[in-house]
Image (cartoon, rainbow, N blue to C red):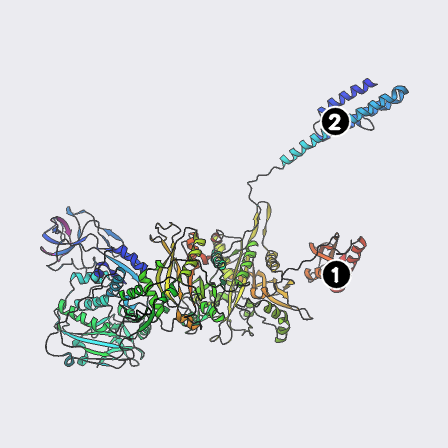
Amino acid sequence: MKVPYHWLKEYVSFDSGPEELAEKFTMAGLEVESVEHVWDSIITARINHLEPVKGSSHLNATKIFTGNGRELSVVCGAPNIKEGDIVPLALPGAQFFNDAGETLTIQVTKKMGALSEGMLCSPRELGLSSDHEGIYILPADTPLGVSLADAVIHLDIKAHRGDLFSIVGIARETAALFGSQLRQPEIKLSEKGKTSIKKMAALTVDAEDICPRFTARVIRNIKMGKSPLWLAQRLALAGMRSINIIVDITNYVMLELGQPLHAFDYDKVANHHLIVRRAEPGETLCTLDGAMRELTPDMVLVCDEAGPLSVAGVMGGASSEISSETTQILLEAASWNPVNIRKTSTKLGLRSEASSRYEKGVDPELALQGLNRAAQLMAELADGEIVPGYLESYSQPAPNITIPFHASACEWLLGYSVTPEEAAAALRSLEFAVEQNSDDGSMLVTVPSWRGDVLESADLVEEIARELGYDRITGKYPTGDAPEPQTTSWFDIQYQFRRRLQQCGCAEIVTYPLTNQRSTLQLLTDESDIAQLLVGAIDELAPAENDKKAGGKAKQKKQSAKHISEMDEQTIPPLDPGALPAVRLVNAVSAKMDMLRITLMNAMLETISANLRYGNTSLRLFEIGRRYIALPNSAQRLPDERRTLCVGLTGYIENWAEPRREYDFFDMKAIIENIAEGLHVANLRFTQTQSPIFHPGRCALLEIEDGGAKETRYQTIGVMGEVHPIIAERFGVTQRTYLCEIDLTRLYLHNTSPRFQSISRFPALTRDIAVVADISVPAQAIADVIRSSGGDLTRSVTLFDIYTGDQIPNGKRSLAFTVEYQSQERNLSDSDGDFLREQATHELKKQLNAVVRE
Amino acid sequence: MLDLLRILKDRAVKALHSVETSAELAQWQNTYLGRQDGELTKILRGLKDVPATERKTIGQRANEIKNELEEQAELRKKTIEERELISALIAERIDVTLPARTLNSGYMHPISQTIYEICGIFQKLGFHIIEGPEVETDYYNFQALNIPQDHPARDMQDTFWVEPGQILLRTQTSPNQIRIMEQTKPPVRAVVPGKVYRNEATDATHEAMFHQIEGLAVDSSTTMRDLRGALEAFARELFGPHTKTRFRPSYFPFTEPSAEVDVTCNVCGGKGCRVCKFSGWVEIGGSGMVHPQVLRNVQYDPAIYRGYAFGVGVERIAMMRYGINEIRLFSQNDLRFLRQF
């Protein structure tokens, strides 16, 4: 909403400049976007003398009288000026925007040798209209030397205050702010002639539910033409172009009072009968902007007996448009249902000054006032004759809302006390009617018809608080009742994860959860393998029975961790192998972001790829975020939002002190073990697996023992590996890259508190054991056998060498471990050591067919 | 013979003075005290030819000299070893300005850091920290917050729909006001950080996904002064002790009265600069007293309970704090950006 400063001053007296006023508005809740100064250094002046510039075919040198006794010379090329014309003159220093949006500053120059001390302005240069044919010739009675300088305050009015989309509405607020009086424009109607409107026109409203009020008048014998400067100027300042006097008056009254109006050419309305009705299927209308609109029965039209004339409250039609030949006007001022207008406007993709006001609600009480004001101006400015009487349908008068109120409600919400007198005065200043009961301080408040946003006591408190100034709400240290302290939250848990990963040298990334199917499926060499994208989040292969057993401990855990109830794991049924269980958007702006992610891995690869392009060649990245898994009947159910960790690793360790080394699988594994250690997760294991995302020989499932039952079971919590080179390349990544994705909800279920184990007083005994086994035997299996063969006495089993080659048969390898044994009760002797080594040798042979080298 | 011993001693002591290295010392020891061919040994070997009466005296003297020389040799040895250690250490001198070995430092994303910092402040004030779903129902995101179907406020927040009219990506963290109050009885104090989504064109200050922190406090005594106090404490902690806070009237469908919250610009200190558009103030979020209709929607009696709610934009605050001028840097995840925090 653009509020011209001088226009505003016509309705309210106050003594602040534009900036100070803007500051007051800001603090009263009218959001000021900017204060714009316009037409500085432009004044009215008279052309005293005119003569051609020597040597030029079109330039004229003029002597201009500015009104303060000074004469200036101005060179002008416009053809339409003559001596005696009063024109707008831009003095040196005045600024304009040209068509390219550049600022032009008027300077003293010489044109073809003639001095030019300013510029005469066209309507377009003043922003009044698109007319650039010649200089704006002002009426002969325009005073000279008057500055056109003004300021425009740009306000961002919120939708609930439809009443503020008018200068009078703003003036009402201003009056309350300054404790002064609103001066409504005085409406003086002088109807002419004896023929009543009833004989000249008719009105039928068939859609009263959508049209609370409709009023119309007829104005005859108007003289079409252009608007006077003051009117065009005000429209221009408020952001509208001058078209012709009639259209300008309808726009002017809309800006002034907030009542949109529409002027039909009376002679183009069939039988002069206006009919308000819903559109019929298949009906069309060519609107004023020249577009053919297809109408639907939920839209309301103003029609004549021949068909649609306008889309009610949105835009008029071309057929009954005002033209230069128009002499009689059928003028409409109505109020419409805001929701209906909003829907129609959205459906047609058509927003107008009128529709944007109707959407926010226009006070039905305003209709007649606006109608009369416009009729008055048409009589005054276009010589129109107002036909006696008006047509009206007023089916839904504005509700009369009264609210019982007590000043103590202010203290209840604001925290400081307000006397009944203060409260009543504040409300009255905004034209609320207040009936005070002096006995108990209560009052009955009647809400003005234009304040549909005020419904209850709290709304009145806000009005009072605004009037008294929000500065009176001074801060105090919060002292109210606090809830019981919160136990561990997911927020805290995730913080721990982030800290851990940071300690592991990883940088956190935050990507858009919005992605697309193509990017997601790029992760798979075989697109039907979508379950692989959800490894760790779902038990895609686990039959129901397995689920039950595996769930045993998990359920106990869940109970003990009940306080972390936000978003527990939901049971996801088996996947349809053809379809991504993704949450899809129906109105995505971009095809690149039309679904929520079901994995973080594609965004991680995209981020790695982008960083490689930026020149960041070594990356240790992580993201903690959610993936969104659509559940069956997703129209009724919210998806499962799973807290997920994704780690990405690529590049190398490079340092002057050591040989450069590429990151590998085991660097990634170190990060994961570190996280598990932070949670004291016992029995995390890495199981060799294959996945279409990863290198066929370099991929592991992350599993955690989910015991309790007799039989040991493992729950999959995630997957890690080296990205398959074909997949990596799809994302533009050509160096070896490692990814890991872990379901954090599941991982956290396995957290434990550390249990102290006493530290032995007795020395440890060390034995080296080199084991030759099939290459297919996992190192972990060998270490496990060695560990269990020593029972309680095994303290650690550490791999220190892997060897293949001479002396080792083909298909086998040698793994050398250092094993530490220690007892809590005694010194272990050498013979104990030999015995334990024997045990290990025996078990390795028996269980893994592995041989210990002597 | 005694003379011989004296001469020998003098010679040995003199020679010892010129010994400079461990090797020379060993050589000296061999020359004078060696068991086989040491000069002292040689002299003592001649003892058998000395008359028995003198033998004792000379023998005693010879032992004294031997001890004396050994003592002096020992002193010399210490000196030499010390000197040799020092020169060995000097030879090991390193250039301390060489770069450090690689110890990968990690970085928390500035958005996470800002969220933790803000939530931490409210945690100290007794607030719970709760997270809610990002895919929400129309009821929680709009209706329960006093934004019925066709309410013009829906225009202010262009919505990504999953099921039109039913399921959407939350446009604000406010739906959690409803979720929290539905689940608990007053007193309530909670902050809710999280991602929110707006179906809007992106530019230097707008993203289709960003982060908000919602605050809610409801009990039987909390007023707008408590709201202001809480936000003042928050602003001072986050932007420095001299930060001032101001309330401006505003409109949100789910608060009444509503207030926009401004803090003094921490770039210019309130004097006016480009960041604050020369106003000296920067808006950090919206707030207000929970609308009585919202309280009724969760079966809280607005005659008994009252409280406030607020929402702040995390990106905006992070941009202010770190002087970041482009919001899209947060989602670009360029390591050269991440490394700075």
- Three-letter code, disc 2: Gln
Determine the image quadrant of residue A149. bottom left
Q: Give the side of residue A136 with respect to residue A682, left or right.
A: left
Q: Give the side of residue A779 with respect to residue A539, left or right.
A: right
Specify whether residue A774 is painted magenta.
no
| Residue placed under numbered mark 2 in the picture | B72
Task: Considering the whole magenta stretch, tell me its main secondary structure.
Answer: loop
Q: Position of residue A701 (x, y in %)?
A: 61, 64
Q: Which chain is disc 1 placed on?
A: A
Q: Residue furthest front?
A: A439
What is the crowding at mark 2: few (fewer than 14 residues within 10 Å), some, or many (at least 20)? some
Determine the image quadrant of residue B64. top right
| Helix, strand or loop status at disc 1 | helix
Say whether marks 2 and 1 touch (CB < 8 Å). Answer: no
Q: Is residue A527 visible?
A: yes
Please determine whether, in this image, residue A718 is positioned above or below residue A280.
above
Looking at the rendering, the stretch of residues picked out in magenta corresponds to: A68-85
Q: Quadrant of the C terminus of chain A?
A: bottom right
- Three-letter code, disc 1: Gly
Q: Is residue A513 visible?
A: no
Q: Give the side of residue B34 with respect to residue A3, left or right.
A: right
Q: Position of residue B65 (x, y in %)?
A: 79, 24
What is the crowding at mark 1: few (fewer than 14 residues within 10 Å), some, or many (at least 20)? few
Please determine whether, in this image, residue A824 is positioned above or below residue A339.
above
Q: Which chain is disc 2 placed on?
A: B
Residue in the foreground of this view, choosing between A773 and A209: A209
Q: What is the number of the mark on residue A791?
A: 1
